[in-house]
């Protein structure tokens, strides 16, 4: 696993692609499906390198998403049975609203220092 994580600890995307190639050369014979699927999604996996260095760690972390999923699972476990599929969607919706209201004004460390750069990236992407 440490071999795979090396590509997420690089200074730039080119270096990360090099680490992936090392990972691929080492493990392709033993785990061809994993290498194949990783290679197909490599652009998406390494997209956080397109953003300023100050916020990369925030972008590659899934902690807040994992926390939300954990809260939804905890709520669903307390319900013994669902009358229909819509009930589960209502729980998901209500927990999402609650979670968003709690975290809406959470500050991202480093965001304001690179706000202009992110805004310029957004404008280029959406031709504004």
Image: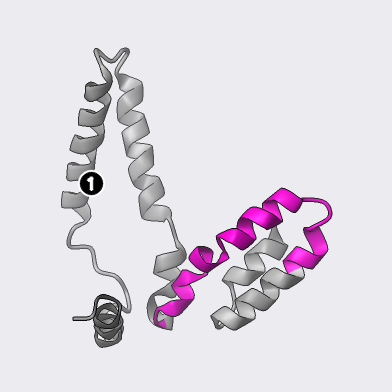
Please identify the dominant SS of the magenta region: helix
Left/right of residue 20 with respect to residue 109 in the rendered view: right
Query: Where does the image place residue 45, in percent across and percent down from the top left?
Result: 52, 64
Left/right of residue 107 with respect to residue 37 in the rendered view: left
For the C terminus, the quadrant is bottom left
Q: In this view, does 92 lie above or below 98?
A: above
Residue at image coords 69%, 74%: 19
The residue carrying mark 1 is 99
Depth order, front residue of 98/31: 31
Residue at image coords 25%, 16%: 84
Is residue 85 highlighted in magenta?
no
Quarter of the image for residue 88 reads top left
Depth order, front residue of 27/77: 27
Residue at image coords 37%, 46%: 67
Q: In this view, does 10 lie above or below 46?
A: below
Quarter of the image for residue 9 reads bottom right
Q: Is residue 47 above or below residue 37?
A: below
Depth order, front residue of 119/128: 128
Q: Is disc 1 surrounded by few (<14), some (14 to 19) or many (20+) residues within 10 Å?
A: some
For the N terminus, the quadrant is bottom right
The part of the chain drawn in magenta is 23-52
For the residue labelled by badge 1, is the local secondary structure a helix, a strand or a loop?
helix
Query: Where does the image place residue 36, in percent across and percent down from the top left?
Result: 68, 56
Is residue 42 highlighted in magenta?
yes
């Amino acid at each position: 696993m440490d071999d795979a994580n090396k590509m997420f600890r690089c200074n730039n995307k080119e270096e990360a692609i090099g680490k992936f190639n090392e990972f691929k050369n080492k493990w392709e014979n033993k785990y061809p499906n994993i290498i194949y699927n990783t290679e197909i999604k490599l652009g998406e996996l390494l997209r956080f390198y397109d953003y300023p260095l100050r916020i990369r760690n925030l972008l590659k972390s899934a902690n807040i998403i994992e926390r939300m999923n954990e809260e939804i699972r905890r709520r669903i476990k307390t319900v013994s049975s669902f009358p229909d599929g819509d009930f589960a969607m209502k729980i998901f919706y209500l927990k999402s609203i609650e979670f968003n209201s709690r975290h809406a004004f959470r500050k991202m460390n480093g965001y304001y220092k690179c706000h202009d750069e992110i805004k310029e990236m957004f404008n280029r992407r959406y031709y504004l």
